[in-house]
Each structure stands twice: as C-alpha cells, then as structure tokens.
C-alpha cells in the first residue's frame, strides 16, 4: 500500500485526502514552522476537514480543494484537534460548516492570556460565538464512523479523531502525538505534563493497533501504517524553502529541510 506520493485513501465508504502533509520540525531562530497536517474526509453524508491550518496554508488549502472539486461552502464539518493557530485559524473559511472542538479545549483556550501562547485569541473568541460551534466530549460519535478520543498533554483538550472505516481504523492525532519520534518514544517536545502525554500516546497506540492496516495521520508528520508491528511511512518528507540571498529577485536558493 505504501507509495511515494500517496495522498488519497479509499477505505470502505470513506475517501480520505491529505491536503497538506505535516512536517516534523521546528525553526531554530523563528519559532514554530506551523507546517501542520490538513486532511479531507468524504462520505456520502458529509464532507469534512480534520484541522484547517494557519494563514500560511490558506492558498494551498484553497488550491488543493479546488483541484479535488470541493468548494469551501461544500465543507459540512470541520473537526479541530486543538486550538493552536497552525491547526485552527482557517475555520472561518467554511461558511456552512459545523465546527467541532472539545469543550475542555475551548474553555482552556479562552482562558489563555492574550499574546503569550500559540492560541489565536480572537479566532477562538469568534468561534465561541459561532452559531454552528459543536463542543464535544470524550467518546462522542462526532460524525458517522468518527469518534473522539480526548488525549491531553499537548493542550488539555487535544482531541484525536478515530475513523472506523469498517475494516481498518484511521487515527488523526493532531498534536497529541505530532510525529513518529513522539509516537515511538511516548514522549513529546511540547507537553505540560510528560506523564499525561505518555498515557495519551498509549491511548493512541491502542486505537491504532486495534486492527491490522490502521493508518495514523499525525499533526506534523506523514501518515503511517502499522504492519506486523512495524511502522511504515506513507509518502516521503518534502519541505523546501526558497530564499533570496543575492542582490536580485531572479536568483533564489533552495534550502531543503530534509536530509
Ligand atoms: Zn499544537
């Protein structure tokens, strides 16, 4: 199944497209890259996005949706894994969508002091007022086939969405488990409590390994599949920066972020 450029999965009655692949890195001098995963899940009864990215992903998000023949007003549901800017800002782009976030995350996000965290305060305040906001709890059936698993550690209300396709599970982890290194080590780069994170990552493993051929789609890494206890990436890491390091706009230097 693993294939270098695979972005689409047809599993049972569900069609999943990775709109943007997350990248497992952070900038040394400029804070977070915000290269987070955005996924589209289509079923006869809904057209949903799991996370919607930040400002930097707006153009690529719109372009990829256009390529897939989906217009923003056709998105029926947006499932937010948590409130951080690089996952949540673009909820405003989908005028007809129900927006789901855990109650715990929403309460916590609104308590954060302005200007000090990765929570986009104004976007969360607007979301609290939004008439199609849906606050979810642990183990809710959010959409047909999709259940919520509250996995605190990165943020208190971080939510993992587990899609039961009928013959395998697809687990969208957001930043409850950002990448393969966190998944394997059961530790995280950004956690307010290492023990809570470890329990959450164990819960994620439980959901992922429940059946063969489960696909895990992390917040900042490529999708992975579990086959006979070995983890395989689906796709390959791609991240390159184009820099103007000369005196002309015509000459750019490509700096790859992958070895
Ligand atoms: Zn985050």
Image: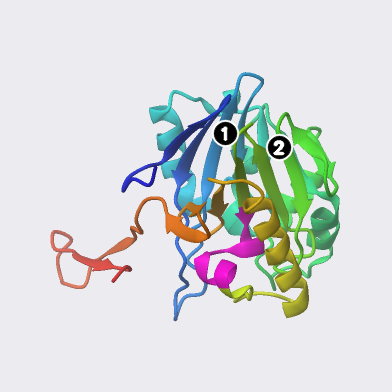
Q: How far is disc 2 from disc 1 in space, using C-alphas?
A: 10 Å
Q: In what element is the residue under mark 2?
A: strand
Q: In what element is the residue under mark 1?
A: strand
Q: Position of residue 259 (x, y in %)?
A: 28, 71
Please give the name of the residue rendered at 38% of the width and 29% of the height, measured from the top-left corner: 67
- Toward the viewer: 14 or 42? 14
Q: Is residue 182 magenta?
A: yes
Residue 3 vertical position relative to residue 165 in the rendered view, above or below: below
Please give the name of the residue rendered at 66% of the width and 27% of the height, measured from the top-left corner: 76
- Toward the viewer: 69 or 143? 143
Residue 157 falls in which quadrant of the image? bottom right
Residue 109 vertical position relative to residue 149 in the rendered view, above or below: below
Q: Report whether 106 appears left or right of 184.
A: right
Please give the name of the residue rendered at 72% of the width and 71% of the height, measured from the top-left corner: 197
What secondary structure is the stretch in magenta mostly built from?
helix
Q: Residues within 10 Å of mark 2 (few under 14, many from 20)?
A: some
Q: Position of residue 86 (x, y in %)?
A: 57, 57
Q: Is residue 147 magenta?
A: no
The residue identified by callout 2 is 146
The residue identified by callout 1 is 41
Residue 258 vertical position relative to residue 209 in the rendered view, above or below: below
Q: Are marks 2 and 1 in contact (CB under 8 Å)?
A: yes
* Extent of the magenta region: 173-184
Please give the name of the residue rendered at 73% of the width and 65% of the height, measured from the top-left corner: 200
């Amino acid at each position: 199944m693993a294939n270098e450029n695979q972005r689409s999965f047809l599993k049972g009655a569900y069609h999943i497209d990775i709109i943007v692949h997350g990248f497992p890195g952070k900038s040394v001098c400029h804070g977070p890259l915000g290269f987070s995963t955005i996924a589209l899940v289509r079923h006869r009864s809904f057209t949903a996005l799991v996370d919607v990215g930040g400002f930097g992903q707006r153009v690529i998000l719109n372009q990829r949706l256009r390529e897939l023949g989906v217009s923003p007003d056709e998105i029926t549901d947006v499932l937010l894994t948590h409130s951080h800017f690089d996952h949540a800002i673009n909820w405003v782009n989908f005028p007809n969508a129900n927006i789901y976030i855990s109650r715990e995350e929403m309460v916590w996000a609104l308590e954060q002091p302005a200007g000090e965290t990765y929570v986009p305060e104004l976007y969360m305040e607007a979301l609290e007022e939004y008439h199609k906001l849906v606050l979810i709890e642990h183990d809710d059936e959010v959409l047909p086939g999709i259940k919520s698993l509250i996995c605190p550690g990165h943020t208190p209300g971080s939510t993992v969405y587990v899609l039961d396709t009928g013959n395998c599970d697809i687990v969208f982890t957001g930043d409850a488990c950002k990448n393969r290194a966190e998944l394997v080590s059961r530790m995280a780069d950004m956690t307010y409590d290492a023990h809570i994170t470890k329990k959450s990552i164990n819960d994620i493993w439980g959901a992922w390994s429940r059946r063969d051929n489960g696909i895990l789609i992390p917040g900042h890494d490529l999708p992975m599949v579990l086959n006979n206890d070995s983890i395989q990436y689906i796709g390959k890491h791609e991240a390159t920066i184009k820099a103007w390091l000369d005196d002309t706009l015509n000459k750019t230097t490509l700096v790859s972020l992958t070895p």
